[in-house]
Image (spheres, rainbow, N blue to C red):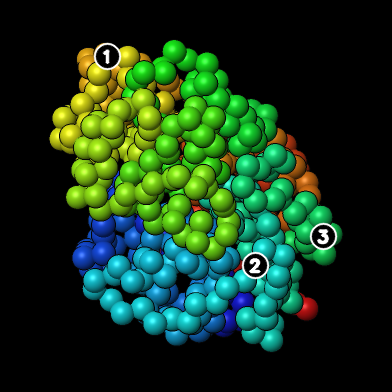
Amino acid sequence: MTAVNVDGEIIILDMGVRLDRVLIHEDTDISKLHSLELIEKGIIPNDTVMKNIEGEVKAIVLSHGHLDHIGAVPKLAHRYNAPIIGTPYTIELVKREILSEKKFDVRNPLIVLNAGESIDLTPNITLEFIRITHSIPDAVLPVLHTPYGAIVYGNDFKFDNFPVVGERPDYRAIKKVGKNGVLCFISETTRINHEGKTPPEIIASGLLKNDLLAADNDKNGIIVTTFSSHIARIKSITDIAEKMDRTPVLLGRSMMRYCGIAQDIGLVKFPEDLRIYGDPSSIEMALKNIVKEGKEKYLIIATGHQGEEGAVLSRMATNKTPYKFDKYDCVVFSADPIPNPMNAAQRYMLESRLKLLGVRIFKGAHVSGHAAKEDHRDMLRWLNPEHIIPSHGDFNLTAEYTKLAEEEGYRLGEDVHLLRNGQCLSFERII
């Protein structure tokens, strides 16, 4: 959560949750927890610092629909007399989050703004959404046009020139903002320590085809696990299921939410025989039918790629569902472990359990949704910002980004600023 204050007019950018702090996975429900408890545990932003800032919040702007960017909206948005603005898919996800909230009544107006469009937030601030690619549809770079120059918010993005769902980034708009003058660029740093450029999503699609179509698995059960918000990845998997003459089955509450909304608003077209089951009882029944009718007729796409306890795949691996793994059944991990010790341990335990059951494990059919070092270099050169705030990463990553910025002529403490949560940075300029 970032707040930009322009002469007393405040724009909030994103309101997310820290997934790792609550050992959360995609099906976890935090709707019954109070915001103060979540703040104390470091799960949602501590927005009490806003009490010390003079000004009025005019809008809450959301960059995309991942929970680490919208998950705190039901807990915090009601504190501000301001509309919530996002792209169509993001706003639909926010609606679902608000409807499921048990503690607070969020009645902020919801405003849809498409990529490529602009809206005047105040007489002095205009919001522009620039189309970008990420591991969820309808992601944008929010740009605040102010009398002092543009503020560009780059959490999160990649440059995918061969997207499976949606369109390429709007490079022309990015370069135009740079030519008109950028006061500050706030940038993610998740993959700054990876050399080169992040591969396009079509590469992951090809890797999945290699794993699924080229393996001896005609008579075995197949389960693919990936991020339920990664609509492009799930689209690729369902298309492969059709080629294998298998019925694709999505299992998990978050699968139903993310994929159902994407299909309802026309972002993606899944195969007609796709089946989606969200609540535990319907998942149990679906797995019972799959076993009864024959595993070889279905391709299951399930939550649980991080080894999260309670997720569908973990429950399957511990014999807590009607589905029992047979020797040579296949599990494809189309997602990398999130880099922290808890996730690594959970994923290791899940894989070990599957191996003991004789399951064939496939890994590596994944590409990141985050920019790598040379993508970041391109973005810096196109925007040519006066100031940079590396963000969305620990100090190792923000420091690594600082090295890149210094290669491009910036200097730490002068025009590159490393901030801790709750800190303020002020720019003063006479216009």
Query: Which is nearer the N-term, disc 2 or disc 3?
Result: 2
> Which residue has dot 1 on it?
327
81 or 380: which is nearer to us? 81
User: Which element is circle 1 on?
Assistant: loop
- Gap between marks 1 and 2 measured at Cα: 48 Å
362 or 116: which is nearer to us? 362
163 or 277: which is nearer to us? 277
User: Which element is circle 3 on?
Assistant: helix
Nearer the camera: disc 3 or disc 1: 1
Query: Residue drawn at (56%, 66%), measured in percent from left and top?
Result: 88
Count of labels in the image? 3
Q: Would residue 374 appear left or right of 135 to someone viewing this image?
A: right
Query: Residue drawn at (64%, 58%), measured in percent from left and top?
Result: 141
Query: Which is nearer the N-term, disc 1 or disc 2?
Result: 2
- Quadrant of the image occupied by residue 33: bottom left
- Gap between marks 2 and 3 measured at Cα: 18 Å
**Which quadrant holds the C terminus?**
bottom right
> Which residue has dot 3 on it?
176
Query: Residue drawn at (19%, 50%), measured in percent from left and top?
Result: 281
Q: Would residue 324 appear left or right of 161 to someone viewing this image?
A: left
- Gap between marks 3 and 1 measured at Cα: 57 Å
User: Is residue 290 among the parts visible in the rendering?
Assistant: yes
Q: Percent x, y for residue 125?
A: 67, 78
Q: Percent x, y for residue 284?
A: 21, 43
Give, as a three-letter code, the residue at label 1. Answer: Lys
- Quadrant of the image occupied by residue 77: bottom left
- Quadrant of the image occupied by residue 121: bottom right
Q: Would residue 115 appear left or right of 354 to someone viewing this image?
A: right
Q: Percent x, y for residue 205?
A: 58, 31
> Which residue has dot 2 on it?
114
Q: For the residue carrying disc 1, how many other residues have a C-alpha within 10 Å: few (<14), some (14-19), or many (20+)?
A: some
Image position of 395 with respect to 357: above or below = below
